[in-house]
Image (spheres, rainbow, N blue to C red):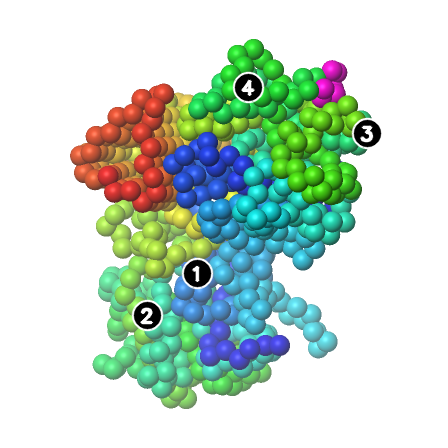
Amino acid sequence: MIKNNAFGIIFANMHDDNLHELTARRTTGSVPFGGRYRFIDFTLSNMVNAGLTTVGVITKQNYMSLMDHLSSGRNWDLARKRGGLVFLPPMSLSDTGVYSGRLEALCNILSFISSRHEEYVIISDSNVICNMDLSPILDYHIENEADITMVYKKGTVDNEDGYESSVFEMDGNLITGISYYSKHPEETNVNLDVTIIKKDLLIEICTYAKSKKLSSFKNDYLVHNLHKLKICGYLHKGLSLIINSKKDYYKANMLLLQENVRKDLFLKGRPVYTKVKDDFPATYGLSSTCKNSLIADGCQIEGEVENSILFRGVKVNKGAVVKNSIIMQGSEIKENCSLNYVVADKNVSFSKESIINGTEKYPVYFSKGSNV
Amino acid sequence: MFKKKECIAMLLAGGQGSRLHVLTKDIAKPAVPYGGKYRIIDFPLSNCVNSGIDTVGVLTQYQPLVLNEYIGTGEPWDLDRSGGGVHVLPPYQKSSGSDWYTGTANAIYQNISFIDRYDPEYVLVLSGDHIYKMDYNLMLKSHIARNADCSIAVLDVPMEEASRFGIMNADENGYVYEFEEKPKHPKSTLASMGIYIFTWKKLKKYLLEDASDPNSSNDFGKNIIPAMLQNNEVLYAYQFDGYWKDVGTLDSLWEANMDLLNPAVPLDLNDKAWKIYGRNRITPPHFISDSASVQNCMIAEGSEIYGTVDFSVIFADVLIEEGAVVTDSIVMPGAVIKKGARVEYAIVGENAIVGEGAAVGARPETMDNRDDWGICVIGPEGELKSGEKLLPKEMLSKEEGIVR
């Protein structure tokens, strides 16, 4: 059990460039997912479920919707006197503006890190959808007397736009090398960007990094110190969906339509917390049909919905057909519309009789508030 | 420090609701689930906060554990406040002895010191038994404008129904001169809704007098109101116009839920201007599978539907397996309807299980004798074993099995 022995740090911004329309006006952490969540809910819930009571959230830009979503941290039981949710908005040492790498970001919040009394820090990105029990990982870190433990999964890499994922070369349970690939068809050890490190060591590393003006944790520091430090890898065997592109985003959402995926992600014992919205349960009209879909509260379905995910308060009017689509909060699909492979952001309005056909490989994206 | 309030609310939530039988065996009536995601008490609580009343005493007595836990500090209803908020008030021991709440007026009488903390001008007395949306502030404004000592909210009911209610006989200006409980020959159609606004100074006086009368049943309707009428206090009948449903019987609870599926019924719970708040479950959106057929119904989060659902209210975290058919029914949170089961005109309680191929209830048309037909109910955690039948008007309780 972690209880009071570790605090968390979440990077809410690291993947903003990869998700285009989805992160045009919001941080990666606040990208909506799965009918009622935002990416950061999974990371934050993992930490809270393992007993962490203090989590710092590092943000960079466009963080209004994230702040609104997290608020005091109450919904994750993090509205605390002793610790709780701490917002860490951008600050930069150099004159070049906001930080560019994780290491530089950590250096900027050194005073927060130093002020914590817990012995360990768990650092995580916010673009991996998984239900991960962090307690055994901390135990593993301590038992193995590791300096740093990094969590990985067995998988392949198939990224869009040349984005490079980091993978580990391992010797037993030690990480001996870090490489970057945008495509790696053979199974390998893919970094899940969850790192455990002793607070004191982190402070040491940051102090060093500050003096050398280092920016990237992996490239500027880790790679040069693989042999000086004991860096262990921990294999996460459960489901984990890394979202590095719009393609990954669409696929991950659609995976929720499979029962075994839902069972793995939404565990009764380790629930996924999110902001509460007092919506009315979904209603289905007389002429409605719905198949193989995930439907949130507040939806009003009068038309046809198939293989789709409808977020809160989506209205599908009579005669409208929605297939293979992801429709976010508050959007409305008016009478006799036909949508196929569409991803609509919040509050998009599709006027009567519109016909929009995307393809599985290239769904059509509509940004927040569009009137189609 | 207690802030002075113009008006505070006292919510009577101590009743057993015995006419809900198995549903209220272990929980108080206001804690009974309603409308897919709420509990009955969400309505008076939400009405209070939407009306600007931020201080509510909730008087509990019967099986209060679930209710007390549900209310907590009042945060879901925005009633977690520093100078007011919601307070659960169970009966308590005093140096002069202790007493359960012996009647509606006695419950308020025992909490005079709670009310006095806020030094209010007015006290709103509510019950936790009804489904309705109401702006109490409008009623308060009317009470003040009419110089009333007591305002009673009334609903104009059809004459045929009037003998079921406490009827207020009022003059053409709305001032009440007579009150009749369930009159055989009603003189008016103004039915009391059990919602009162009292000028606190006056009410306190009558409560103290009533408490010292050993023959009194310490009830608002039976004792306080008649006493005030006798002394020519100013009683005003405040007319309410809107949906209001007493959910004190199994039939009315079922009807009130089904009303939500009827677009002609004027209860709009999707009203952004008057939200009904409640404690939300931590569960993902619900899932409708390929094998499911879902029509004309309401489904809450966390449920997984693989069977057929028609004209029903499905609460959260319900599992309806493939081949199961649920029509004209209410399925409360956490219940499981197994493969091939049939549920018709029924209420399935929280976490109940309907076994494979079991049959719960029947359509009225299929009964030889229409008088034998009625809603049937499975109580919380009740289990109807595989292949078994629960007939209309029967109830299945976890501890006692099938009862009529």
**Horizontal and vertical percent position of residue B261:** 30, 44
User: Which quadrant of the view contains residue A14?
Assistant: top right
Q: How far from the left and from the top, in percent, is residue B87?
A: 57, 66
Count residues near mark 2 (Cα–Cα under 10 Å), then give few for <14, some for 14-19, many for 20+: many
**Residues under labels 1 and 3: Cα distance?**
54 Å
Secondary structure of the residue carrying tag 3 is loop
Residue density around tag 1, few if under 14, some if 14–19, many if 20 or more, within 10 Å: many
Estimate the x, y position of residue B328 in percent, counting from the top left. 34, 38
Is residue A174 highlighted in magenta? Answer: yes
Residue drawn at point x = 76 percent, y = 46 percent: A118
Tell me the kind of residue under disc 1: Ser
- Quarter of the image with the C terminus of chain A in it: top left
Q: Which residue carries the number 1 mark?
A: B46
The disc, 3 or 4, on the residue closer to the chain's N-terminal end is 3
In this picture, which residue range is highlighted in magenta? A171-176
Say what amino acid the circle numbered 3 marks. Glu
Residue at 51% x, 34% y: name it: A15
Q: The disc labelled 4 sits on which kind of residue? A: Tyr
Relative depth, front residue between A121 and A322: A121
Q: Tell which subunit mark 4 falls on.
A: A
